[in-house]
Image (cartoon, helix red, strand yellow):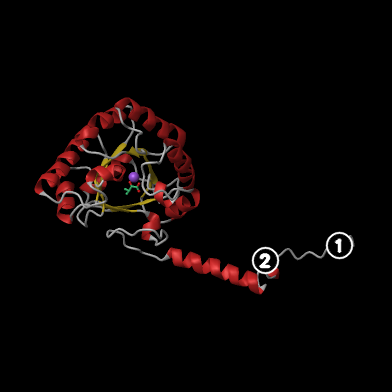
Amino acid sequence: KVKMTVGDFKKFKKEGKRFSFVTAYDYTTATIVDESDCNIILVGDSLGMIMLGYKGTESVTMDDMVHHIRPVVKGAPNTWIIGDMPFGSYITPEIAVANAVRLIKETNCDCVKLEGGVEMLPQIKAIVGAGINVMGHIGLTPQTASSLGGFKVQGGTPESAAKLIKDAIELEKAGCFSIVLECVPSGVGKAVSEAVEIPILGIGAGPHVDCQVLVTQDLLGMYGDFKPKFVKQFAQVRQVMIEGLNEFHKETLEGTFPSPEFSFNKQVDIPKLY
Ligand code: KIV
Ligand code: NA
């Protein structure tokens, strides 16, 4: 497996070559993704829900992100790794640059991602100006979902679709090398993708975008709390894990585990002390 470079993103789009993109928040999962054919890992602030049990992403801190990105970088040397910028970490261009530099310096990830359209241009330009690769994120932006009226499909009117197209064009001009587009009608995904030369990475954005993104724990059927419409479960790993745990429990009660195969069998003369 050859690690993607920043130049590959535009090149793949130009060549019509699709690629895939999943999350990981820990070393073991990172090694699994690295061994798979998937091209990109996002250490997303979705770790708030998936790893920390929060209701949303708002409480995730920069320290949380650094803590989770580091082991992923160690576990996936052949995979392009995105460090997500958490809520509140890019409220001004100065704060955005300081935090983006921190993520790169302390974790060695390949780029940062932040949410927002044209209103984020000053922050995006500042981070790009500091020499850091920036991935955009438009459409449904979970960090500010409450101001969008909840976790709802975006771009459902001609006006809001036009805003997304404008956002994508401006983000490309500002130097983003790719953009996540979340939860929009398929036709809007197609239009946004056609409007720019950088790849559009879709999650719930239909089949006409350049790349598909899913949360690993969602697509493997590990996370039990909530399944959005756009999540296809490609495996039922949660069930496999529960069955494995129940087997262990059962053999423990029966006394069939551990058998000699899983025990240290050297004979020792035990002194009679009791
Ligand atoms: O944090 C995350 O998992 C994300 C994806 C939904 C793109 O931002
Ligand atoms: Na995120």
Between the residue at mark 2 and the residue at mark 1, the CA separation in whole angstroms equals: 21 Å
Residue 188 or 196: which is nearer the viewer? Answer: 188
Question: Can you name the residue that lies furthest to the left here?
Answer: 158
Q: Residue at x 42, y 38 (%)?
A: 61
Verify CB contact (< 8 Å) between mark 2 and mark 1: no
Give residue 98's position: percent from left, percent from top.
38, 27
Q: How many marks?
A: 2
Mark 2 or 1: the one toward you:
1
Report which residue position mark 2 lands on: 262
Amino acid, disc 1? Ile
Number of the label disc, if any, that sits on residue 270 = 1
Q: Residue at x 27, y 60 (%)?
A: 229
Give residue 231's position: percent from left, percent from top.
31, 59
Q: Is residue 91 left or right of residue 198?
A: right
In the picture, the quarter occupied by the C terminus is bottom right
Q: Is residue 28 left or right of residue 174?
A: right
Q: Is residue 228 left or right of residue 83?
A: left
Residue count near mark 1 (Cα–Cα under 10 Å), binned few <14, some 14–19, many ≥20: few
Question: Can you name the residue that lies furthest to the top here?
Answer: 94
